[in-house]
Image (tube, helix red, strand yellow):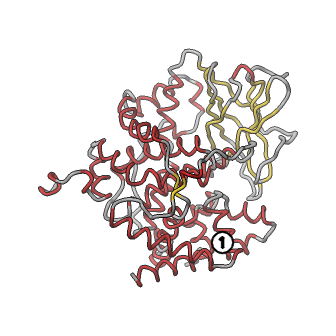
Amino acid sequence: MNHPDDLLAGYALGALDSADAAIVEEHVEECVDCREDLAGYEPVRESLALSVDQVAPPPGLRARAMSVAARDNEVTGSEIQAAGRVSRQGSFLRGPRWLYGVAASFGVLAIGLGAWNLALVQEMYRDQDVLVASQLAEMADASDLQMIRFEGVAGGTLMATADGRRAYVSLEGLPALPEDRTYQIWIMDMEGGSVSAGMLKPDARGVGSMWIDLPNGLPNVSLVGVTEEPVMGSDHPADEKLCIAEVQGPV
Amino acid sequence: MAPNQAEKSLEECSDEELVHRLALGDESALVVLYDRFGRALFSLALRITSQRAVAEEVVQEAFVRVWRHAGRFETSRGKVSSWMMGITHNLAIDELRKARSRPQIADTEIDLSERLVLTGKVGNVEQEAWNRIQIGAIVEALGEIPKAQRKVIEMAYFGGMTQLEISAMLGEPLGTVKTRIRLGMIKLRSALKEAVEIE
């Protein structure tokens, strides 16, 4: 059995890309030694977290953080119903499968102390289904909801409300990239300028999604485009766009 | 629930008991968890994102996750503090990555008078004592490992960078970065283990 000794410490720090992280997770399911090795890094991770300068949070944060339970209870219906409302919009029939499988199994990998902790955090963090579905369900109820298709080498959907300052980008068919490259999302405005909306790493199926900010609102967006860039991102988009969603249309 | 637990106040509950109560729908347990860990979580989020408003959102979102997933946390198999720190770390790193391509102005308005001396004051009394040991050991160990190893660990943990991104930024071979992270983390792990054994 090959042991990914050079990856365990990086995994503990969250410093692996998804492919390498998957290698570690798969391996520690089978290998007790590596599982224990990984578990041994948990105190290091916690200590690093605690070693930062302690700063008092603002007084209002306590109340806001505590209201989460009440807000959560207000989400009407189950997340399955939410996904159902979204799926009836039609355009999502070509969306990623997770949108329908919201009530996914929450099985926890049976791995050891510490390593289990790390894996649970990673798994939970990747488990965006429930939270994103409820957020999208709220947007789907808006009367001015717009869903715009991405056209090009890859496909997908841009979902936003007319007066909103956020949009949800869901892409599929993204070609696999070498390790030193990434996808970057750009907002082209009505004056011809472009601003980066962030970088996206698709999963092994070529599917990726993320929320992006629209600082000046949807009416001021000409196009949303996706380019391939170096791994650290670029200040300006590459000439070739992988796919484009025409919002207000070209300038 | 054992009879003695029914009489225990929330403040007397262990972290694990609080999470168990959350899983049963007891919202008041969230308040105690915030009082124990809110500052540490906010401090971590602020350290990573350098933006107060973003750090606040991260902490709020962290508590959403804790509330929603309390039922999945197995109290016999991990520390609550590690779990909550891990959630916060991942959320903060995600915010950092999203903002990476955009011009960001670090929050320079953090009032230095609000900075507290590292006291290890997180959690209940026992946790506090343990944290003092941990923090002391990790700070000392970080000072003792080679600068190159400390740098890559900090870039990974606080900068949210992958090994490949660190390699690209430093202009160092990927294998070198992996080795530095591995050796540095082994030393930190060993230092913490020693500190525990001494205590």
Against B152, is A94 above or below?
above
Against A130, is A18 above or below?
below
The C terminus of chain A appears in which quarter of the rendering? Answer: top right
Q: How many marks?
A: 1
Can you tell which quarter of the image residue B54 is in?
A: top right
Can you tell which quarter of the image residue B44 is in?
A: bottom right
Most extreme residue toward the left, as rendered?
A: B3
Q: Secondary structure at mark 1?
A: helix
Q: Nearer the viewer, residue B116 or B140?
A: B116
Most extreme residue toward the top, as rendered?
A: A143
Residue under numbered circle 1: B150
Q: Residue at x 73, y 23 (%)?
A: A247
State left or right for residue B10 relative to residue B196: left
x, y (%) of residue A212? 65, 35
The answer, for residue A106, to whether it is visible in the render is yes
Against B43, is B131 above or below?
below
Q: Nearer the viewer, residue B115 or A110?
A: B115
The answer, for residue A112, to whether it is visible in the render is no
State left or right for residue A112 relative to residue A24: left
Q: Nearer the viewer, residue B85 or A107?
A: B85
Q: Residue at x 43, y 42 (%)?
A: B64
State left or right for residue A74 relative to residue A118: left
Q: Residue at x 84, y 24 (%)?
A: A191
Return the chain for callout 1: B
